[in-house]
Image (cartoon, coloured by chain):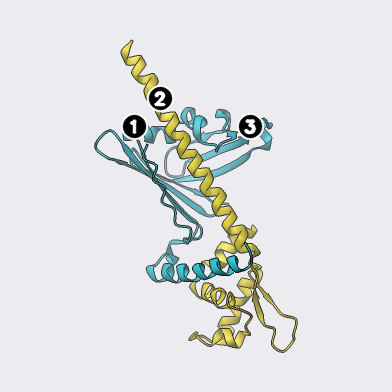
Chain colours: A cyan, B yellow
Amino acid sequence: MTNETATNPTDLGELTITRDYDAPREMVFRAMIEPEQLTHFWGPTGTHTPLESIVLEPWAGGRFETTIVPDGSPPDAGFTMKAVFVDVVEPERIVFREPELDMISSSTFTDLGDGRTRVVIHQTNVPPEYRTEEAQAGFKTSLDRFAAYLAAQGR
Amino acid sequence: MADDPLSTTFAALADPTRRALLARLAEGEATVGELAEPFAMTLQAISKHLKVLERAGLVVRGKDAQWRPCRLESAPLERASEWIEANRKIWNDRLDQLDRHLQQLQTTGRKRTAT
């Protein structure tokens, strides 16, 4: 796997991660929408995602719910995500929204033509109307100054 | 709009004027009048933005009745950046594990084809 992680910390509340996988696009896409597969990789290290906790209706408006349980803890100690799919286009794109956090996550799948697939995860909770170039430039400048400020506070 | 502290922080930061106000306060305390100076905005408009920042806990107003200088409060920003960091870790872990999962899937797939 080419491990290319492009995350810009100055985009507060925004996350972009790019990864290349040595697997065909259809396979990578299916892994992301089949509960039997999600259960194997969805939770971060030290957790698991019980299959019975996954509700996955892969169409616009469908539910997407998972519970991530720390290893060794009872299932009710887990963290439940309740999301709704905004867009599911096989095998190109999956977009879901978490209403509680007002956060949108999109995954795009690009066939690299040599049996590999590029996955780009983009997550944002900044409303699109604020994502103009001007606003972003201002945002970055002020955040750079925040970073300097926080550093000065001894962080 | 959800009313958890993190959402309040992000909502407060979503406006360019409010970010500019915070950037100014990162340089030191200022009165509303001083804060309003570089903006083509009325004091009332600036006060309104400051109220949003105060509610989000990003700005604290002094007790001095006449001047009430504004000060930047960094704790919510730190919580926001901690959350961003944790969220990034979750996705990185997830994508690492997806890679292992896909490799395993292909290995078993190949075995099946071979037999």
Label 2 marks which chain's residue?
Answer: B
User: In the rendered structure, the residue with mark 3 lies on which chain?
Assistant: A
Element assignment for label 3: loop
In this view, the residue in front, B30 or B53, is B30
**Residue under circle 3?**
A71
Amino acid type of the residue that numbered disc 2 sits on in the rendered structure: Leu
Amino acid type, callout 1: Ala
Q: Is residue A154 left or right of residue A25?
A: right
Q: Quadrant of the N terminus of chain A?
A: top left
Circle 2: element type? helix
Identity of the residue drawn at 58% across and 65% down: A151
- Residue closest to the eye, A129 or B57: B57
Tag 1 and tag 3 share a subunit: yes
Residue B87 position, x and y percent, is 54, 48
Question: In the rendered image, which residue does mark 2 sit on?
Answer: B105
Labels 3 and 2 positioned on one and the same chain: no
Residue position marked by numbered label 1 in the rendering: A23
* Camera sees residue B63: yes
Residue drawn at the location 40% of the way across and 24% of the way down: B105
Q: Provide residue A100's location: percent of width, then percent of height.
A: 58, 52
**Residue A65, picture quadrant:** top right
Query: In screen coordinates, is A93 left or right of A41?
Result: left
Give the side of residue B65 with respect to residue A101, left or right. Answer: right
Distance between the Cα atoms at labels 3 and 2? 23 Å
For mark 1, give the secondary structure: loop
Residues packed near mark 1 inside 10 Å, few (<14), some (14 to 19) or many (20 plus)? many
Q: Quadrant of the C terminus of chain A?
A: bottom right
- Tell me, yes or no, whether dots 2 and 1 are on the same chain: no
Residue B43's x, y, as percent? 58, 86
Residue B52 higher or lower than A110, as above or below: below
